[in-house]
Image (cartoon, rainbow, N blue to C red):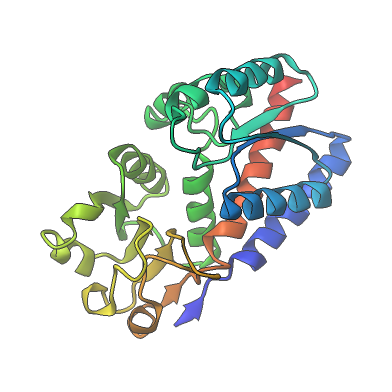
């Protein structure tokens, strides 16, 4: 078993990005909307700020209290849509109770949608015309490519919480010549055989230790995209100790998909800034 360390993969991506920005004399701007006092969200935003500063991307943080009105958040997004300093924008999730997440994301200008999950951009991506590559699937593909495993004609299964993410991940994988399908978290017991036949297993559920080694194929590449805070620690969807005995490659949690996702976000900001020129 070999660890696919996200920090190493992210480091190379960020280094290449820094060189590209310097060569092209670009100084893009990333705006982040943070609502509420979620401790994990604050940590993630801090990591994004640190990485942005390291590569030469201007970082703008706009904070709102959880009791502020949704209309105020939307007003700020509309202002940022018109701000030429801002090339990419994200809303840090999850939002507090009472906020309509999809409505708020829909307010982002599709040309500044750095996460790539605006419904218009998703529709284009799912149709095979990538305007903005969704960040999370992009990170997973980057990790798979870094493993140097021959991906063509491999069978992948994505265990997801939503159909839209499962479908997005399936399109991303098939674009790399991988035979891919997805199942929802509630279907695991019914579709254990599909998981056991997967050469590549990807999870994004948020339920600690849900996938154990007894349903993982020998030699599988396992990408754990789940993260749940338990006290001061974080845990993934994979029961690491049992799965590592079966997997050929596996991502750790923390330090796996997370750092690569941040690098891919900044890469998207760079690409959006090029398009805006």
Question: Number of marks in the image?
Answer: 0
Quadrant housing the N terminus = bottom left
Q: Is residue 91 above or below residue 214?
A: above
> Horizontal and vertical percent for residue 56?
84, 44
Side (left or right) of 92 relative to 19: left
Side (left or right) of 240 relative to 30: left
**Which residue corresponds to the image point at 54% horizontal and 65% vertical from the top-left?**
256
Q: Nearer the viewer, residue 43 or 23?
A: 43
Quadrant housing the C terminus = top right
**Which residue corresponds to the image point at 41% horizontal and 44% vertical from the top-left?**
172
> Horizontal and vertical percent for residue 219?
34, 77
Side (left or right) of 143 relative to 210: right
Q: Is residue 174 above or below residue 7?
A: above
> Horizontal and vertical percent for residue 33?
64, 34
> Horizontal and vertical percent for residue 234?
50, 68
Q: Is residue 209 above or below residue 110?
A: below
Is residue 8 at least partly visible in the picture?
yes
**Which residue corresponds to the image point at 42% horizontal and 49% vertical from the top-left?**
176
When asked about the image quadrant of residue 165, the answer is: top left
**Residue found at the very far left of the displayed protein:** 190
Is residue 197 at least partly visible in the picture?
no
When asked about the image quadrant of residue 72, the answer is: top right
């Amino acid at each position: 078993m070999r660890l696919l360390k996200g920090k190493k993969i992210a480091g190379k991506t960020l280094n290449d990005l820094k060189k590209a920005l310097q060569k092209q004399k670009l100084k893009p701007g990333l705006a982040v909307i943070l609502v509420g006092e979620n401790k994990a969200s604050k940590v993630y935003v801090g990591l994004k700020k640190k990485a942005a500063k390291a590569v030469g991307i201007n970082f703008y943080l706009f904070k709102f209290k959880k009791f502020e009105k949704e209309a105020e958040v939307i007003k700020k997004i509309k202002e940022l849509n018109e701000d030429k300093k801002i090339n990419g924008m994200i809303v840090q999730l999850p939002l507090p109770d009472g906020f309509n997440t999809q409505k708020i994301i829909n307010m982002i200008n599709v040309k500044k949608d750095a996460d790539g999950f605006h419904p218009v951009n998703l529709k284009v991506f799912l149709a095979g015309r990538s305007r903005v590559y969704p960040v999370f699937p992009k990170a997973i593909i980057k990790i798979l490519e870094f493993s140097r495993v021959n991906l063509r004609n491999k069978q992948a299964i994505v265990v997801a919480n939503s159909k839209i993410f499962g479908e997005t991940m399936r399109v991303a994988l098939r674009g790399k010549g991988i035979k891919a399908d997805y199942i929802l978290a509630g279907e695991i017991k019914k579709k254990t055989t599909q998981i056991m036949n997967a050469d590549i297993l990807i999870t994004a559920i948020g339920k600690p230790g849900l996938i154990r080694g007894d349903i993982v194929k020998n030699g599988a590449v396992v990408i754990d995209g789940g993260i749940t805070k338990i006290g001061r620690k974080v845990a993934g969807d994979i029961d690491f100790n049992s799965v590592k005995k079966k997997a050929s490659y596996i991502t750790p949690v923390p330090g796996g998909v997370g750092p690569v996702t941040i690098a891919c976000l900044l890469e998207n900001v760079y690409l959006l800034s090029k398009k805006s020129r």
